[in-house]
Amino acid sequence: MIVFRQKYPRWWFDWNRELLRFANRVGVYLALMEDRYPSTDEQQAVRLDFGYPEARQD
């Protein structure tokens, strides 16, 4: 969709961002860098944040 229509749907971006955030929390937990079990509904000590890209400009 990004290649053909030059759009990145907001819902797709939000889904991917939340999936990456959770994967990072699980990875940090498995690497024994954090002792709290990874949560799916709240932010924890591990934070991942990046802005919404403009497909046509970026």
Image: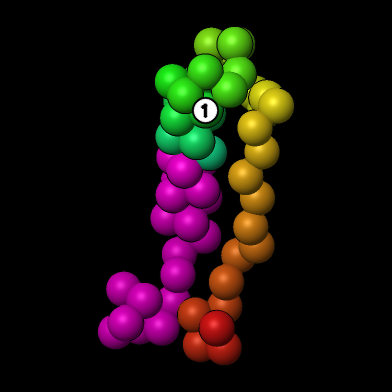
Residue 40 spot, x, y in % from top left: 52, 22
> Can you name the residue that lies furthest to the bottom here?
57
Rendered residue at 48%/57% (across/down):
13
Residue 24 spot, x, y in % from top left: 50, 36
* Label 1 packing within 10 angstroms: few (<14), some (14-19), many (20+): some
Highlighted range, magenta = 1-20
- In terms of depth relative to the viewer, which is nearer, 5 or 33? 33
Reading the image, the residue beneath label 1 is 28
- Left or right, 13 with reference to 46: left
Look at the magenta stretch and give its main secondary structure: helix
Q: In the picture shown, does residue 8 fall above or below 10?
A: below
Q: Quadrant of the N terminus?
A: bottom left
Q: Quadrant of the C terminus?
A: bottom right
SS under mark 1: helix
Residue 22, can we see it?
Answer: no
Q: Identify the colour scheme used.
A: rainbow
- Left or right, 48 with reference to 25: right
Residue 56 spot, x, y in % from top left: 51, 87
Rendered residue at 49%/80% (across/down):
55
- In terms of depth relative to the viewer, which is nearer, 1 or 44? 44
